[in-house]
Amino acid sequence: MIKSKDIKKNENSSVKLSITIDKEDAKKAYDSVLAQYAKEAQIPGFRKGKVPAAILEKKFGRGIRYEAGENLIKDALDEAFKEIEEKPLAYSIPTLISDFPEDFTKDITFEVEYDIYPEFSVPDYTDIEVEEPKVSITEEEINAELEKLQKQNAIVVEKEEGSRVEEGDIITVNYQELDENNSPIEGSKREDYVFTVGTKYNLYEFDDELIGLKKGEKKTIEKTFPEDYQVKEFAGTTKKIEVEIKAIKTQNIPNLDDDFAQDVNEKYETLDDLKKDIENRLIKEADSIIRQKKIDQFLAKLSEKTEIPIPKSMIKAELDNSYHQLAHQYQTTEENLDKALEKEGKTREDIYKEWEPSATEALKKRLIINQLIQDKKIEVSDEEMENYYKEIAEGAGVDVEQVKQYYAQMGLTNEQLSYDLKEKKLFDQILEEIKVKKGKKISYVDLTKANE
């Protein structure tokens, strides 16, 4: 079908493909559509299937030419994409930039533009230097983890009759807003609301005002909220809230001893066993965070040295995906998210403009990783994949089959998991090749905070 083809590269990994189709194939395509019209057309004065071609062309000429042209272009592109390396990205539909075919009695030439996977090379990176902070696990940090375990294993019990609310108590309240006449405001009432005093996990943050009250007591609180209050409709206003204490509970914290360690997990015989295991876990977590920090530094510096002509359709697809994920995060649809933005005087396009620099940089880094995996010919064997599953299973305290079933339910394929392992192997190599200098000392707490 294709008599000749030519491809030219434009900016940002866009190409222009020119195709010339032989006039004989052009006529065949036209005659095929004409024959179909002749078979199906119903025109008064003619039997079905017996309408002369001239009549059909006069009545349906434009439709016949359009359908024939569409078929020709589709078939020619299918043929071309089997032969050329410059194939379009999945989300880049070839766009016709020439005139649509009209004359099917001679050779037909048409041109399309589309985006392709960007071609680039990764420059030498062995001179890149990254910093590795020095972290030590302190006794205080181990004790802080023990305290968390104590709270997790605490038993919640009712406080004795006549006890008063104290910080840290778990209380159940009924509350409602009152108007200037001390009448309840419709729709503001909330019953059996439970929260821990001191956390301020309640709409009005009335924790402090409830300290000292007993079960069954009521208190009317008048509270003025600052201009920057997190609940926008309360900001800068004064509210009157009536609160009734329905229940007061406290946590019975277990003692830190060998029995506590055994209750946490039967694998521990003593409290020292538990503390040692906590220390080892914190060391592993710190090592993992430090490793990722070194990788992030490396990619940021390599990205500055690397020129990649990222196509616009690839950036658009990245932004579309981020918007979809945002809607999913808020458990809504993209259309509802559009409406919510409109209320704030924004559009999806405004958000895309804000996101584009970071989305482009994230894409650039992923492209670099992909290219390095190809350049280094990193592969993953079946045995390595199985060991990877075992490692995950051991860390989660489950068997390998459970891990495989979990990933299958999440829709993650072996190919996707294999890519994760390839990436891990890649950075194992790279961190051995680049320069790593010792950074400043930092506590485990500060390390994890910086990583949030």
Image: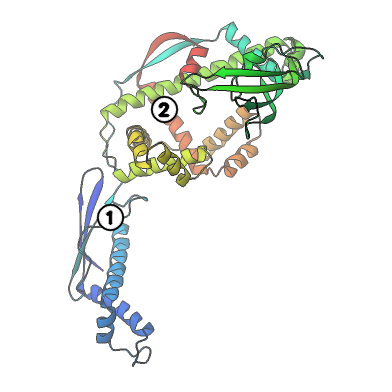
As drawn, the residue found furthest toward the right would be 161
> Residue 427 — which label?
2
**From the viewer's perspective, is residue 197 above or below residue 20?**
above
User: How many marks on residues?
Assistant: 2
Left or right: residue 66 compared with residue 107: right
**From the viewer's perspective, is residue 20 above or below residue 274?**
below
Quadrant for the N terminus, please: bottom left
Q: Residue at x 29, y 56 (%)?
A: 94
Quarter of the figure with residue 34: bottom left
Left or right: residue 434 compared with residue 380: left
**From the viewer's perspective, is residue 175 above or below residue 100?**
above
Left or right: residue 46 compared with residue 218: left
Query: Crowding at label 2, few (<14), some or many (≥20) Cα neighbours within 10 Å?
Result: some
Q: Residue at x 20, y 68 (%)?
A: 108
Q: Nearer the viewer, residue 130 or 209?
A: 209
Q: Can you give x and y, in whole percent of width and height, for residue 6 in the image? A: 19, 57
Q: Earlier in the sequence, mark 2 or mark 1?
A: 1
Q: Amino acid at mark 1?
A: Ile
Mark 1 sits on what residue?
84
Element marked by disc 2: helix
**From the viewer's perspective, is residue 224 above or below residue 405?**
above
Q: Are marks 2 and 1 in contact (CB under 8 Å)?
A: no
Q: Nearer the viewer, residue 73 or 452?
A: 452
> Residue 113 — which label?
none
Element marked by disc 1: loop
Q: Amino acid at mark 2?
A: Phe
